Amino acid sequence: MNNILSQYMMRTILAGTAMVLVVLLALAGLFEFIAQLDDTQGNYQTSQAIRYTLLRLPNLAFQMLPVAALIGSLLGLGALAGGSEIIVMRSAGLSVRELAGMAAVSGAVMLVLTGLLGEFIGPPLDFYARNMRLEARYEQDDGRLGKATWVKDGSVYLHLERVNPDFEFGSLYMYKFDGDRLAAIAIAENSGIDENDNWILENLRETRFEGDGVQVTTASRSIESFEVNAELLGSALAKPLSLSGREMLSYIDYLRRNNLDATRYVTELWYRVSRTFSVMIMPVLSLAFVFGSLRTGGAGGRLMIGVLVGLIYYLASETLANSGQVFDLNPILVTWLPSVSLALVTLFALTRIR
């Protein structure tokens, strides 16, 4: 009996969440498309803007799932409560704890789906969409395709004239240090990374400072091996939203080994984990709500409560995550505080139910 009721509750919650998510994505996609129309340039026109918007929808869905889960659960469970079905379940002998467990199972299913979406589907499609837009905008002007950047590899600092998705960097400046002493300066007219992650430097001219003398060497083609490979460089170019958790972990490890600031990526990683976890809490919180005055209220009242709580959670999460980077606060603390607070509120609300 419990399995049948659990499946029934799960279908209700998942159906409500899916309906709300579709509505939210339709609105977000429309706003994204309108914003892209103001940014058309080169070969990036309306058809490409539509494609870009569609490719970004999975990442937008990942960001909206906690709010969609809350509103959808409130609507679904509220409908069950309005029809006295939850009261019947309790009359059949189900305790509040068992009902919360059923709601949590639905949350666990959404947690898995959210994790898959945020790790394997959303980030790669988002990365592809941004690269597609960049190439379409500057396809007729290769000199603007990419941007200059600095890269650190141990005691070596590299300045790349431009970095693009094809990993063709143009001219490259290389500064080698021996402790605090500048040991060598080199310039290559052309550079890039091949399929084996080797750095190919063409027309290289290197000046080495040895003792009291200077030695100059030249080479028409030089193959260098750096710790920074195409994957790490791609992570450096991408926005954190376009990186999977595995890619962020790899890039964070690189930054820390080179004594570089990794706060932005650590914060994004933990924010993503806490946001995924919060999806599991939302159905249980909704259950606590529908036992109260919302049981006899209409769908409009439940929708209002869901939007209000979801908005507070979203604003608190974003504010804490951003302020944590500004004020150098512990990333784990600032990213988990809203979700932990939500879990405590849920627990407190459930204990108040009689």
Image: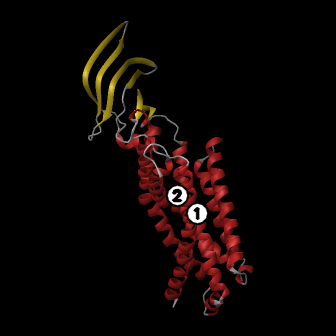
- Residue, disc 2: 273
Q: Nearer the viewer, residue 299 or 266?
A: 299
Q: Residue at left 41%, top 51%?
A: 128
Q: Is 258 rendered above or below residue 133? A: above
Q: Position of residue 319 (x, y in %)?
A: 66, 51
> Residue 41 or 149: which is nearer the viewer?
41
Classify residue 72 by image quadrant: bottom right
Query: What residue is pinned by disc 1?
Result: 27
Picture coordinates of residue 124 (x, y %)? 41, 54
Q: Is residue 335 visible?
A: yes
Q: Looking at the picture, does residue 291 appear above or below residue 61?
A: below
- Local crowd at mark 2 within 10 Å, few (<14), some, or many (≥20)? some
Q: Position of residue 351 (x, y in %)?
A: 69, 76
Identified by mark 1, the residue type is Leu
Mark pair 1, 2: CA separation: 25 Å
Q: Dot 1, crowdedness within 10 Å: few (<14), some or many (≥20)?
A: few
Q: Which mark is residue 272?
A: none
Residue drawn at the location 56% of the way across and 51% of the way down? 35
Judged from the image, the secondary structure of the residue bearing numbered disc 2 is helix
Name the element at disc 1.
helix
**Residue 53 locus on image (x, y percent):** 49, 56
In this rendering, would 131 be left or right of 74?
left
Label 1 vs 2, first from the N-terminus: 1
Q: Nearer the viewer, mark 1 or mark 2?
A: 1
